Amino acid sequence: MKVKVGENVYLQKYEVAHILHELNSFPATVMDEVFGNGESSFFFMNGPTDAFRFESVFKNPASVKWLMEQDWIVDYDEYSEMPLPELEVLVERLKAEHDAGIDEFNAKDEAYREKHFEEVSDKFHKASHKISSLDDLISARKGEVTFVFPDGYQVKTTPGASGATSSPKKKPSFFARLFGRGAQ
């Protein structure tokens, strides 16, 4: 997912991994901003939840423009206030369209499939990625995963939605409960 703060775009670490490993082409400015300072901190993830951190910042106008134009990279602001039941219905519809598209492609003759494999594969990878990101948003809204937003970002949530997109309150640790510190 992406969020825009001022003139910058922040991506979740998972998003950067997808761009670098799955796409055939993207602007060189994106690569420069990931590796330009000689560091690639994005590669160092401490478990699967670290992937949900909006830590990869893109400042170059060409990178920002390209990232904002990519519909398959879910813009958090576009879906954050959608009522949870509507979001779940949207995801199911997108899954059905994705599966029907794959079935339709597989029904084509072999020559067609060979000729169009790369473009269709790219299209289905992007659609699958969008579905996965929206599933992650649903999980965040239900409190099952936590998104860590960049400083200065105003988190939006749906009023009355089950769960919130900001960090849920943590249960006190075992030792805190045992010794009465931090217990609520």
Image (cartoon, rainbow, N blue to C red):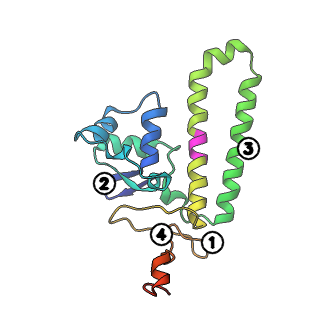
Left or right of 23 on screen, residue 152? left
Residue under numbered circle 1: 162
Looking at the image, do the residues carrying marks 1 and 2 touch, with CB atoms under 8 Å apart? no
- In the image, what residue occupies the spot 61% across and 54% down? 135
For the point 23% across and 39% down, the residue is 38
> Is residue 163 located in the magenta-colored stretch of the structure?
no
The answer to the question of whether label 1 and label 4 lie on touching residues, with beta carbons closer than 8 A, is no
In the picture of the structure, the residue carrying the numbered disc 3 is 96
The spot of residue 32 in percent (x, y) is: 28, 36
Q: Which residue is nearer to you in this view: 177 or 123?
A: 177
Q: Residues within 10 Å of mark 2 (few under 14, many from 20)?
A: few
The image quadrant of residue 123 is top right
SS at badge 4: loop
Residue 84 at what x, y percent from top left? 64, 65
Q: Nearer the viewer, mark 2 or mark 3?
A: 3
- For mark 1, does the 10 Å Cα neighbourhood hold few (<14), some (14 to 19), or many (20 or more) residues? some
x, y percent for residue 89: 71, 56
Residue type highlighted by circle 3 = Ala
Judging by the rendered image, the residue that carries numbered circle 4 is 167
What is the three-letter code of the residue carrying label 2? Glu
Where is mark 2, residue-wise?
7
Which amino acid lies under the numbered mark 4 shown in the image of this protein?
Ser
Residue depicted at 34% across the width and 38% down the height:
30
Give the Cα distance between marks 1 and 2. Answer: 31 Å
**Disc 4 vs disc 3: Cβ atoms closer than 8 Å?**
no
Give the camera-side residue of 159 and 131: 131
Q: Are marks 2 and 4 in contact (CB under 8 Å)?
A: no
Q: Tell which of 109 and 61 is nearer to you.
A: 109
